[in-house]
Image: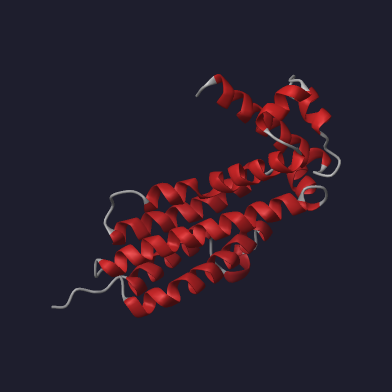
Amino acid sequence: MTMASKTRERLLDVARQLFASNGVEKTTMNDIATASDKGRRTIYTYFKNKKEIYDAVIERESEAIVMKLRNVVISNLAPAEKLKRFLEARFDIVEETIRESTTSQIISYITLDYKRLERIRTLAVAKEKGLISQMIDEGVSQGVFDPVQSRLFPGVYEMIFQGFDFCHLRSNFADFNLTAEEIRESVIHFLINTLVIKPTT
């Protein structure tokens, strides 16, 4: 990474922290300059204004969320194995996000930071949908995925993970007499068996 890239990443790290703790509206270019030990002139070398910094933070954070999924989709794995790894990675993302969240972060997200987080989530979901389409199209073109089930898959996938994400946030898997691990295994098994064409005997 070049010095310029390191400086840009440093500015984005500082901006992200300030946006999370103070809110986007209350964070100024001066705040970012002071917290990053850089002058305003340095910031304007990389970004035209606060909105451009904000957009770059959103893009970087949404990309961080889907990077595991993207790496699976661009891999050389066979379609069925790729689908399995993709689903496993999606479950991992939820579990890691919940595990890494602290009470103070959650409070910040609910209050000052909600709009930023919602925008990150929206962009990440859009990227995730694109990756799903790419993966499914590849499997259908190779004759591995059922074309009819493939058309239904994105909607079913989205609803399943919305429910799983919600349950994880509420920690209420016990209400369904299931563990997160049992749900994970069942969903992966169900979706793979629904989508992959069974070999004829």
Quarter holding residue 124: bottom right
Q: x and y percent of residue 44 in the render?
A: 72, 29
In this rendering, the answer to whether 97 lies above or below 13 is: below
In the rendered view of the protein, which quadrant contains the C terminus?
bottom left
Q: x and y percent of residue 136 in the render?
A: 37, 66
Judge by depth and name the residue closer to the eye, 160 or 2: 2
At x 64%, y 41%, the residue is 56
Residue 56 lies left or right of residue 67; in this view the side is right
Quarter holding residue 25: top right
Residue 50 lies left or right of residue 145; in this view the side is right
Which residue reaches farthest bottom? 148
Q: Please tell me how many numbered marks the rendered image carries.
A: 0
Quarter holding residue 18: top right
Q: x and y percent of residue 180 in the render?
A: 53, 59
At x 26%, y 73%, the residue is 197
- Regarding residue 102, the answer to whether it shows in the image is no
Residue 21 lies left or right of residue 173; in this view the side is right
- Regarding residue 32, the answer to whether it shows in the image is yes
In this rendering, the answer to whether 34 lies above or below 147 is: above
At x 47%, y 60%, the residue is 130
In this rendering, the answer to whether 121 lies above or below 30 is: below
Residue 35 lies left or right of residue 187; in this view the side is right
**What colour scheme was applied to this rendering of the protein?**
secondary structure
